[in-house]
Amino acid sequence: MPEVVVPDDFPSIFFGTEAHETLKSKAEVKVYTEKAASPEELQERLRGAVVAVNIRAYSKFTPELLASCRDLKMIAVLGIGTDNVDLKAASRLGIKVTNTPGYSAVAVAEHALALMLAAGRKIPQHQQELQAGRWTRIPMVQLHGKTLGIIGFGSIGRQMASLAKGIGMEVIVWTFHPEAGPPTRPGIRFLPLDDLVSRADVVSIHIRASEKTRHLLNREAFQKMKPAAILVNTARAGIVDTEAMIAALKSGKLAAAGLDVFDQEPLPPEDVLLTLPNVVLSPHTSGMTPEAIKRGNEMVAENVVAFLEGRLINEVKP
């Protein structure tokens, strides 16, 4: 039987699940529930694997690693983003890559909405004041009637648009290919990126990380934003120039940010973001609901089983 290796199920969400049992009926399956201590250990875990199931983005499938995995034919990523896999190198080596689109759309959009509301309503600051014994009334933002700018309009972006419309926000969208997307709901407009960042009261990022989207929001973009704008990022940290964002937060050009993703994860205890009062943080958990985890596990197993049967679904190309 072909060998399927899950090298990075830590913290564990896959071992012992129905999806795990499904794969065990089709292949020899090895699941590692501790983080590899080094790239060399990750390489050793993948030795002999025909399929790698990638659970965590901290596992980097570099060209060097991929070249060393001579038996590897497929990487099944549990997640939407594949920026931890060198897709060009995989393609050159004939390694197929799949992901699980849409599995966490509801969970991530709800989390983005929660970060937006917490940042606008300044929930963390109010809690800190109460815990310090002070009854402080800090000015807040009412989001009803404000404009949400959504960057990216895949399954998560569309779900976010629906939630925002539900609380009375106007919605504008930027995406690379608006003409190729699904029909929009009434009242949702596609705009150029410069127009979106200059008109939006809140900007929420829901686009894949790639070479084209690295630092999509840079110093110039922050300068174009409205005074007192709010930024929400539940996608990938690299889409935003972090130094430029911090400068905007410190200067007041950016009123607040709700962040679930960071340049370095776990976030170091000395990171400046932890010291800013106008930032709401969560530890890359936006998709970690039981419902999303279950569906992600199911989809990754479906992708692997299809591959072993000679089919390919949910392929990601360079």
Image: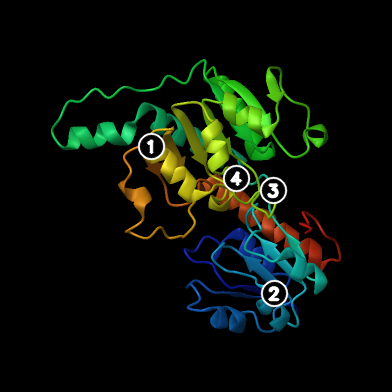
The residue located at (68%, 22%) in the rendering is 188
- The mark nearer the N terminus, 1 or 3, is 3
Please tell me which of labels 4 and 1 falls first in the chain: 4
Q: Residue furthest right?
A: 310
- Give the number of the mark in front: 1 or 3: 1
Judge the density around disc 3: few (<14), some (14-19), many (≥20) Cα neighbours within 10 Å.
some
CA distance separating discs 3 and 4: 8 Å
Pick whichever of labels 2 and 3 is earlier in the sequence.
2
Q: Quadrant of the C terminus?
A: bottom right
At a point 33% along the width and 49% down the height, the residue shown is 274
Residue 20: which quarter of the image? bottom right
Which callout, 4 or 1, points to the residue nearer the camera? Answer: 1
User: In the image, which disc is placed on residue 251?
Assistant: 1
Instruction: Identify the disc placed on residue 101.
Output: 3
Circle 4 Cα neighbour tier, 10 Å, few/some/many (<14 / 14–19 / ≥20): many
| Horizontal side of residue 246 vs 197, given as left or right | left
> Under tag 2, what secondary structure?
helix
Q: CA distance from mark 2 to mark 1?
A: 41 Å
- Give coordinates of residue 26: x percent, y percent: 73, 70
Secondary-structure class at tag 4: loop
Q: Is residue 142 left or right of residue 63?
A: left
Q: Classify mark 1: helix, strand or loop.
A: helix
Going 56% across and 20% down the picture, which residue do you hit? 166
For mark 3, give the secondary structure. loop
**What residue would you read off at disc 4?**
104
Which residue is labeled 2 in the image? 63
* Residue 21 percent across, percent down from the top left: 63, 65
